[in-house]
Image (spheres, grey):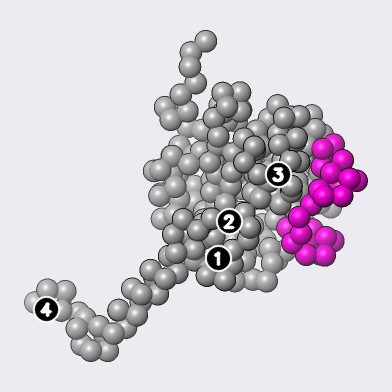
């Protein structure tokens, strides 16, 4: 069998993303909500790009993700699509686009592929969402599952809390992961669960697990790009690493611009037309 060489893959898809787990190669996933960001993450070789409903908070300034709409998600997914050549594009199914009716779930999932050019969709929830997930997959649409802390259920959980510490919740998550695999999901996001549980789930399923606050034993990791770039100085969950502090860099640049304008130093003669 030929050696698996992920960096030589021209286009990431469901079939080859599963090979990462088999080969023991970690998968990198980032969010993106706009064209210039998509260009950068694709150039670097990020395997999967998620247009998450987190855009509602980190990009639009809303209190939570619950008011994100299908039209909003389709709009941003289509924009990100234009910046991608290699990465697999994931559209995030927003709140109440799939929970109420399986047929509606399939129709909404289809919009991500038909109108926005997504490669697949992500659906929050475990065992209780299997009928909707099966309907989506039966329509020919790949699904990434999402269990643990599912932000669309924040009010039911009573906040953004770590899930899986209680025995009954741990058992629910283990059973949900297996049910999502059996239903046909090609991967599962594990969010805000104990590391030991992240490892256990990863070892118990054959599909890749993508962690966000689920420990280093997951098959891959995902972060919100605005979080890892340090756009928000006062927002640093335990699972986030600031690779840069762009809030400070941008603030410094804007202050310099303001000063140059105020002092008449911008534009200079070379920055003006004759």
Q: Does the magenta stretch include residue 6?
A: no
Please state which of the two labelled residues, at mark 4 or mark 3, is closer to the viewer: 3
Residue furthest front as drawn: 196
Q: Give the range drawn in magenta.
A: 150-176
Residue 256's image quarter? bottom left
| Residue drawn at (63%, 58%) of the image | 238
Q: Does the magenta stretch include residue 165?
A: yes
Local SS, label 2: loop
In what quadrant of the picture does the C terminus appear?
bottom left
| Residue drawn at (63%, 61%) of the image | 237
Q: For the residue carrying disc 2, how many other residues have a C-alpha within 10 Å: few (<14), some (14-19), or many (20+)?
A: some
Residue 52's image quarter? bottom right
Whether 250 is drawn above or below 161: the answer is below
Mark positioned earlier in the residue sequence (3 or 2):
3
Q: How far apart are the two marked residues, 4 and 3, measured between alpha carbons?
A: 59 Å
Q: Which of 178 and 74 is in front in this view?
A: 178
Q: For the residue carrying disc 1, how many other residues have a C-alpha within 10 Å: few (<14), some (14-19), or many (20+)?
A: few
- The disc placed on residue 240 is 2
Q: How far apart are the two marked residues, 1 and 2, measured between alpha carbons?
A: 17 Å
Mark positioned earlier in the residue sequence (4 or 3):
3
Residue identified by numbered label 3: 195
Q: How far apart are the two marked residues, 1 and 3, measured between alpha carbons?
A: 29 Å
Please state which of the two labelled residues, at mark 3 or mark 2, is closer to the viewer: 3
Q: How far apart are the two marked residues, 3 and 2, measured between alpha carbons?
A: 15 Å
| Residue drawn at (59%, 39%) of the image | 220
Residue identified by numbered label 4: 269
Mark positioned earlier in the residue sequence (1 or 3):
1
Residue furthest left as drawn: 274
């Amino acid at each position: 069998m030929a050696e698996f060489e992920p960096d030589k893959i021209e286009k990431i898809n469901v079939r080859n993303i599963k090979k990462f787990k088999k080969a023991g190669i970690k998968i990198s996933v980032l969010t993106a909500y706009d064209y210039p960001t998509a260009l950068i993450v694709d150039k670097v070789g990020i395997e999967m790009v998620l247009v998450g409903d987190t855009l509602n908070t980190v990009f639009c300034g809303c209190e939570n993700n619950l008011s994100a709409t299908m039209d909003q998600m389709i709009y941003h997914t289509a924009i990100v699509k234009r910046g991608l050549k290699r990465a697999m594009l994931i559209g995030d199914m927003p709140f109440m686009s799939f929970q109420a009716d399986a047929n509606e779930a399939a129709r909404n999932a289809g919009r991500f592929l038909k109108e926005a050019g997504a490669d697949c969709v992500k659906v929050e929830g475990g065992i209780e969402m299997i009928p909707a997930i099966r309907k989506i997959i039966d329509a020919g649409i790949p699904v990434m599952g999402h269990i643990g802390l599912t932000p669309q259920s924040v009010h039911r959980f009573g906040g953004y809390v770590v899930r899986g510490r209680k025995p009954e919740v741990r058992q629910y998550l283990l059973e949900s992961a297996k049910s999502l695999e059996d239903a046909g999901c090609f991967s599962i996001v594990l969010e805000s669960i104990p590391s030991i549980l992240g490892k256990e789930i990863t070892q118990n399923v054959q599909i890749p697990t993508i962690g966000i606050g689920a420990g280093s034993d997951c098959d891959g990791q995902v972060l919100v790009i605005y979080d890892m770039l340090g756009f928000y100085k006062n927002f640093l969950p335990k699972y986030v690493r600031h690779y840069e502090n762009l809030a400070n860099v941008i603030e410094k640049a804007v202050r310099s611009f303001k000063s140059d304008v105020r002092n008449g130093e911008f534009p200079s003669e070379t920055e003006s037309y004759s």
